[in-house]
Amino acid sequence: MNINTKNDFELVPGCTDGISDISFSPAADYVAATSWDNQLRIWEVLPNNTAVAKAAVAHDAPALCCTWSRDGTKVFSSGADKTVRMLD
């Protein structure tokens, strides 16, 4: 099996524990990821297949899922701490 890694990119700084969810913005070149290290992280993906860290939001327990608003201006995360966070 051939795997095409031509369009791969590394998210730095990365998560320090397992990723629980990942979501691409519907309106811009941003990706959000939640992880078991209690964080929601957001990166901007550049045309040269690099990614730049833009923001991080902490939960008090593992961050379990994330999603973008339809217009791509907000990202939401929820966690095992029974909270929902929104980043505008």
Image (cartoon, rainbow, N blue to C red):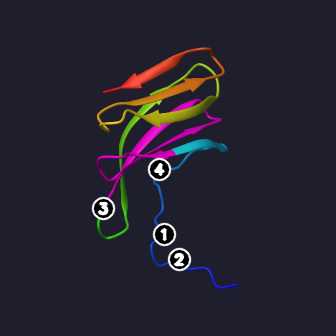
Q: Earlier in the sequence, mark 4 or mark 3?
A: 4
Circle 4 crowding by C-alpha within 10 Å: few under 14, some 14–19, many from 20: few
In percent of width and height, residue 60 lies at 59, 19
Give the residue displayed 59% in from the left and 42% down from the top.
Answer: 21
- In the visual, does 18 lie left or right of 75? right
Specify the segment rendered in magenta: 23-46
The answer to whether residue 1 is left or right of residue 54 is right
Give the mark, 4 or 2, whose residue is nearer the N terminus.
2
The main secondary structure of the magenta stretch is strand
Q: Nearer the viewer, mark 4 or mark 2?
A: 2
Q: CA distance from mark 4 to mark 2?
A: 20 Å
- Could you tell me if the residues under marks 4 and 2 are in contact, i.e. CB atoms within 8 Å? no
Q: Are marks 1 and 3 in contact (CB under 8 Å)?
A: no
- The residue under label 2 is 5
The dot on residue 8 is 1
**Label 4 vs label 3: CA separation?**
15 Å
Return the x and y of residue 47 as percentages of the image width and height.
29, 67
Helix, strand or loop for disc 1? loop
Q: Do labels 4 and 3 touch, CB within 8 Å?
A: no
Instruction: Single out the mark in the foreground, 1 or 4.
Output: 1
Answer whether labels 2 and 3 touch (C-beta < 8 Å).
no
Q: Give the mark, 2 or 3, whose residue is nearer the N terminus.
A: 2
Closer-to-camera residue (39/2):
2
How many residues crowd mark 2 within 10 Å: few (<14), some (14–19), many (20+)? few
Separation (CA) of disc 1 from disc 3: 12 Å
| Labels 1 and 2 touching (C-beta < 8 A) | yes
Residue beneath disc 3: 46
Which residue is label 4 attached to? 13
Q: Disc 3 residue type?
A: Leu
